[in-house]
Image (cartoon, rainbow, N blue to C red):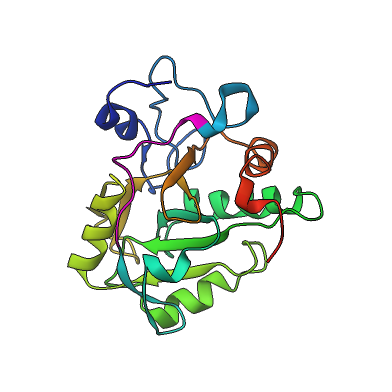
Amino acid sequence: MRFPALPVLLAAFLVSCSPAPGAPGQSEASAPAGVQSGGTQSGCLSRAYPEIGGPISLISSTGARVTEADFKGRPTLIYFGFTYCPDVCPMTLTTVAAAYRKLPEGVAAPQTLLISVDPGRDTPEALAAYVANKAFPAGLLGLTGSEAEIRAAADAFKADYSRVEQPGSMAEYTMDHTSLLYLMDEDWKLKTFFTHEDTPDTIADCLQQVPAAQSAP
């Protein structure tokens, strides 16, 4: 099953992290015609674009240098966001945590990664404090790095982000960024992705279809 051109698809999920009317932080763009949210009804494991995903080299919230090799062997769920994000990022991470709680016994949750798109503020220490939020997935790991390292990781996942100045704000600026959850398999190959339209139920249903997730480590 093929979908519309990849750049058009991903552009539909660029969100603003500035407070705005309506749904908190969500762009008004939706998926192109023919693209639905994840879950069994849309064949959630059919969206495995080979163009998405690639090597990373970043610093974790524990202070260690990590690459994609450190996460092979089990599914990994990746989100690009930042700690100053007022609504979209925390809402997405709490949705993921709720999805994991719906997994039946014997189905392991993926390793979850938050890759910061704001390396200027998101130090390993700042990320460590952020990912410790009990509303977020257990074991959530934050990743940061230099501007070049973050951009390289985002490019590998066809994710976009940009700085938006906020004169007069205490935060000074915010970041607009692609809001997708990328599910990588045990070989670091894209298995599927989830959008802001997905719910804990659709995410949990899809995760149960991943063969490597059928037995907890």
Q: Position of residue 92 (x, y in %)?
A: 54, 49
Q: Quadrant of the C terminus?
A: bottom right
Report the residue at 46% width, 35% height from top. 21
Q: Position of residue 96 (x, y in %)?
A: 61, 51
167 lies above or below 122: above
Which image quarter: residue 139? Answer: bottom right
Farthest residue, direction left: 148
Q: Position of residue 28 (x, y in %)?
A: 40, 28
Magenta span main SS: loop
Q: Nearer the viewer, residue 42 or 211?
A: 211
Report the residue at 46% width, 55% height from top. 78
Q: Nearer the viewer, residue 28 or 6?
A: 6
- Magenta segment includes 181: no
Instruction: State the extent of the magenta-drawn residues as a range.
Output: 46-55
Q: Quadrant of the N terminus?
A: top left
188 lies above or below 37: below
- Magenta segment includes 50: yes
Q: Position of residue 2 (x, y in %)?
A: 38, 21
Q: Nearer the viewer, residue 74 or 181?
A: 74
Which image quarter: residue 56? Answer: bottom left
Report the residue at 47% width, 63% height from top. 72
Task: Answer left or right for 3 relative to 5.
Answer: right
Which image quarter: residue 147? Answer: bottom left
152 lies above or below 20: below
